[in-house]
Image (spheres, rainbow, N blue to C red):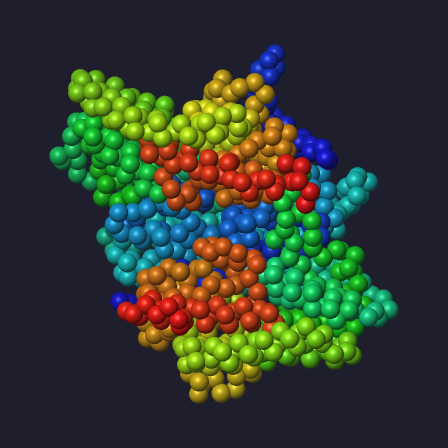
Amino acid sequence: MEKITILEGRQKQIFEKKTGAEQLDISCDTSSLSGSVSQRACVFCGSRVVLYPVADALHLVHGPIGCAAYTWDIRGAVSSGPELHRLSFSTDLQEMDVIYGGEKKLYHSLIELIEQYKPKAAFIYSTCIVGLIGDDIEAVCRKVAKETGIPVLPVHSEGFKGTKKDGYKAACHALMKLIGTGSTEGISKYSINILGEFNLAGEAWIIRKYYEKMGIEVVSTLTGDGRIDAVRRAHGASLNVVQCSGSMTWLAKEMEQKYGIPYIRVSYFGIEDMSKSLYDVAKHFAERPDIMEAAKQVVSEEVKELYPSLQKFKKALTGKKAAIYVGGAFKTFSLIKALRSIGMSVVLAGSQTGNKDDYARLKEMCDEGTVIVDDSNPVELSKFILEKEADLLIGGVKERPIAFKLGIGFCDHNHERKIPLAGFVGMYNFALEVYQSVMSPVWQFAPRKGVKI
Amino acid sequence: MKHAKTATQNACKLCNPLGACLAFRGIENCVPFLHGSQGCATYIRRYLISHYKEPIDIASSNFHEETAVFGGSHNLKIGLKNVSKQYKPEVIGIATTCLSETIGDDVPMIIREYKQEFKNGSPMPIMIHASTPSYMGSHIDGFHAAVRATVKTLAEKGARENLINIFPNMVSPADIRYLKEILEDFKVPYMLLPDYSQTMDGGPWGEYHRIPPGGTPASAIAMAGRASASIEFGSTLETSKSAAGYLEEAFGVPRYHLSLPIGIKGSDTFFTLLETLTQQERPEKYDDERRRLIDAYADGHKYVFEQKVIIYGEEDLVVGMTAFLSEIGITPVLCASGGKSGLLRKSIKELIPNMEELGIKVREGVDFVDIEDEAKLLKPDFLIGNSKGYTMSRKNNIPLLRLGFPIHDRFGGQRMHHLGYRGTQELFDRIVNTVIEQRQNASSIGYTYM
């Protein structure tokens, strides 16, 4: 087989854990190398994924049609009520708008859409060319807010102005403008906000139920099954519980500074991290030992049911090898533990947006020989999948065909999943999905098994 | 309820660069390259993958803030260098985006500079540049722009050859395979562009391919200027925007411009043209296909006659489908497209002169909310189009027959036929079954024979 080489500018973003190897000094937090086919997206994408699940807001993409078209109903973020977030709105800028400016079109679009759909607020996403043609989005938003009486929030998400992380920040910035504008009356002292949980396949509902069983009030979920009114009163909670650290830590820090709300980082994937996320919240409310008791009760009930059901999968999967390439590094930690609990080892671990601390921790956790990558690409991923003889790839839609072409199993752990993978029940679903993909008899025909094609 | 009209809601189109990326995938050993933000490439990859289920590498010049201020030249060159090194492509298909077009990057000049700067390095890939600003037209315009740019870059002058160029428009990999089979059966040398029948619908890999096997070789495209004729599908594709139009103008290769051959009449026109150009009768196998199709029309005619449908999608697909539907007695009460060529109505009128009498309404430049408004008044029996109509189909309880691109919520869109007798047969079977299923489900008796 032809040897696959790594691009010069990329070598510092790859690390293989070996005894006696030099210190990990992975280069990350950089923008992608031109021409390297990154699996990352852009600033707009970052903003769009964070705000997308707010179901009673109008999401208007200001720019040419592509950005809105490619994000129309793109995620499995479900709502228990309104579903305005599942529609796609664009100012669909044309050549003349680019020449003469798109402010008027934006204004009329907003006024008409707000009249038609009566949203609780509107988010206006700037795309690449809006940053160039110099539309004064702020002014249009202020004017429309005044005329319609709802918050109209600009999201500065011009695609080229940074990385996906900057998009997260722009989205959090818009959320910060809403937080603090609602009444906090009647909110319990034992209350939390769930941050960075997007209710994919109803995952936020699962998590919320666990906390409620512990006697904790969930004030707001940001942004899964999100509602503007709930966001407005989020500052009334006593603790912020942050999942998907990449997207929401900034918001948690801002809320800590402005409202004095402390935050903790959690993960809802796998038995170990799921349990810890309940215990950590209980620990925060130490003056109420009954909360810890209730947390233990929840965990013990759930694990008692879950554990035996995992054994079939573990038996089949023991010794199989996995490759992980997901958006945030924090998820990678949980997935390594979750995979170990069903007998699998990890031979490749990487993320699009991890930072130095993340990669240091990843190195701690990984076995000898594991390859760690930042902002990887299909060529590299394939190289390591083949070299390390992985049986499974965990990633998103863009990674899926790589796995299937090479004849290995795949688990979608991204925004498009339709089955909840969070919580204890999520661990069962995860194990089942991994099992059904890795153990499928179809791989007997895969060329990597030496079958002639 | 008053509908907002200024904004586009649930668009019935995609952006220009997507079409260009797909077309470039139909060239052998070619990497599509978007000159713009990283997001464009990633979103388009994701979108294409959801339909084709194939790995699709699209490089990006990955604009930063400085790039937008000082121009994209530096980034584009680094990108081209990196792609050349990592993919070793024979061709790089460069499409612009709204960003690079708005800042006014002179891509042809940057390419010239690049070639000059790196001329002593490793083999220089052929670079094709298509101008595809997202604020003009839609994905289909990007598709044609890339095909035309490819021919413009590669086609050479020379003695006439016994060769037919065929430009099939944005059709499925299965359609492309069928067209190739037809041309091979006619035993005529041909150059089909773009040919993504294998790159977008191929077999498993024993090793990683930076660029998947398949596609039209650059050397074959070079011959296009020497062909004896070009056949180009697409009624709304203007000469000035088409590859065949360019070849006619630059090299005098006659352009035969047909609507997408869907239905018996449309397919007959195509086969008759092939017979004329090759001076031979069509192989018996296609007469058989045609006979089976006519027989199927007879067997199924009662199910479909006077059914009302809304058909939407790219304009050329809509024209081809409308011609087919009208020959089986289905009335397309609305022919709709997000595209805006200004030629949709005229093209349909040419094929169906009595369209007004039949109650065929045509609308260009619409979105799915417009189509939904129309559906409420027109009350179609079902919808025909891509997966994007599902939201309104579900909401209004109107069945949707999926075809074209994209198909995100069903399996096998890339293997679906639309063209010729074979494609029409497949479509006809599916349409009849849509009607039967609807009736069977609606019946309180539960007939087991329909």
In this picture, is B85 found above or below B247?
above
Q: Is residue B256 visible?
A: no
Q: Quadrant of residue B370?
A: bottom left
Can you say which quadrant of the picture contains the N terminus of chain A?
top right
Q: Position of residue A238 (x, y in %)?
A: 22, 27
The residue under the point 61% across, 36% down is: A382
In this picture, is A277 found above or below B42?
above
Q: Quadrant of residue A384?
A: top right
| Residue B312 placement, left or right of B215 | left
| Residue A446 placement, left or right of A167 | right
The residue under the point 20% across, 20% down is: A293
Q: Position of residue B217 (x, y in %)?
A: 75, 55
- Identity of the residue furthest to the left in this view: A186
| Residue A137 placement, left or right of B353 | left
Q: How many labels, in total?
A: 0
Q: Quadrant of residue A109?
A: bottom left
Q: Position of residue B267 (x, y in %)?
A: 62, 76
| Residue B368 placement, left or right of B267 | left
In this picture, is B98 found above or below A274?
below
Q: Is residue B445 visible?
A: yes
- Identity of the residue furthest to the right in this view: B159
Can you say which quadrant of the picture contains the C terminus of chain A?
top right
The residue under the point 42% across, 36% down is: A432
- Identity of the residue furthest to the top in this view: A20
Q: Position of residue A88 (x, y in %)?
A: 39, 55
The residue under the point 29% across, 70% down is: B445
